[in-house]
Image (tube, helix red, strand yellow):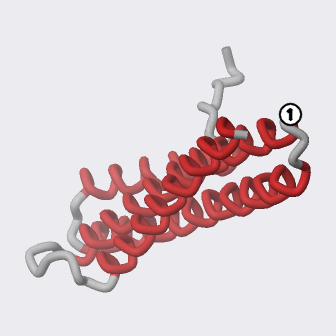
Amino acid sequence: MQTAEQWEQIAKIRQQIAINHEVQSGNIANGNRSNSLDAGDLLDLAGDEKFLAAENYHKASQEWDKAATAYTSAGASDEAKIARDNMKAASAAAKRALTDGVYLHMKAKEQYEGTNNLIKQLDALEKAARNLERLSCGFAQCVNSLF
């Protein structure tokens, strides 16, 4: 049971990190970051925080899965069910954070269009595409099926 409890503790820490990134994203999107940044930069940074949240939610889901497996091996079926439920919730939170990040990066791109900043437009589009790829392929790297 010690191993399962360790995986559970790691998962809880990862979830807290993810939640903190989401809070930070909201603070940035509401302009609480810096007066020196324009709207596009604030939206882009908020999208970056959503991506970091998604990464940590995903890692938490992996740790919950390890905890569930360890609890099952130890015969602790109630704890295993709770861990599996937490794994599903963390996975759903990762997907939601990625979706929110796409929205924020696309809004940033719109702001950059208004200032004719092509470099920042491309950067925001790359980040939106990365999030969409993660949503469609999971967190594993998408493999180019053309080759």
Is 40 located above or below residue 61 in the figure? below
Instruction: Relative to 75, say whether 82 is above or below.
Output: below
Q: Quadrant of the N terminus?
A: top right
* Left or right of residue 101, residue 26 in this image: left
Residue at coordinates 61% horizontally, 45% vertically from top-left?
134
Above or below — where is 33 with respect to 143? Answer: below
Residue 120 quadrant: bottom left
Instruction: Say which element carries label 1.
Output: helix
> Closest to the observer: 118 or 64?
64
Q: Is residue 68 left or right of residue 15?
A: right
Residue 108 location in percent, x, y? 35, 69
Q: Position of residue 89 (x, y in %)?
A: 72, 63
- Using the image as rendered, state which of residue 119 and residue 104 is in the foreground: 104
Residue at 59 percent across and 64 percent down: it is 99
| Residue 46 visible | yes
Number of numbered discs overlaid on the protein picture: 1
Q: Nearer the viewer, residue 127 or 57?
A: 57
Q: Position of residue 90 (x, y in %)?
A: 66, 58
Q: Using a 10 Å C-alpha cutoff, classify the residue at mark 1 as few (fewer than 14 neighbours), some (14 to 19) or many (20 or more).
A: few
The part of the image, by quadrant, that contains residue 41 is bottom left
Which residue lies at the image location 8% right of the left edge and 75% below the top edge? 36
Left or right of 81 in this view: 65:
left
Mark 1 is on which residue type?
Ser
Q: Quadrant of the C terminus?
A: top right
Q: Is residue 97 above or below residue 2?
A: below
Please name the residue that numbered disc 1 is placed on.
73
Give residue 85's position: percent from left, percent from top: 80, 60
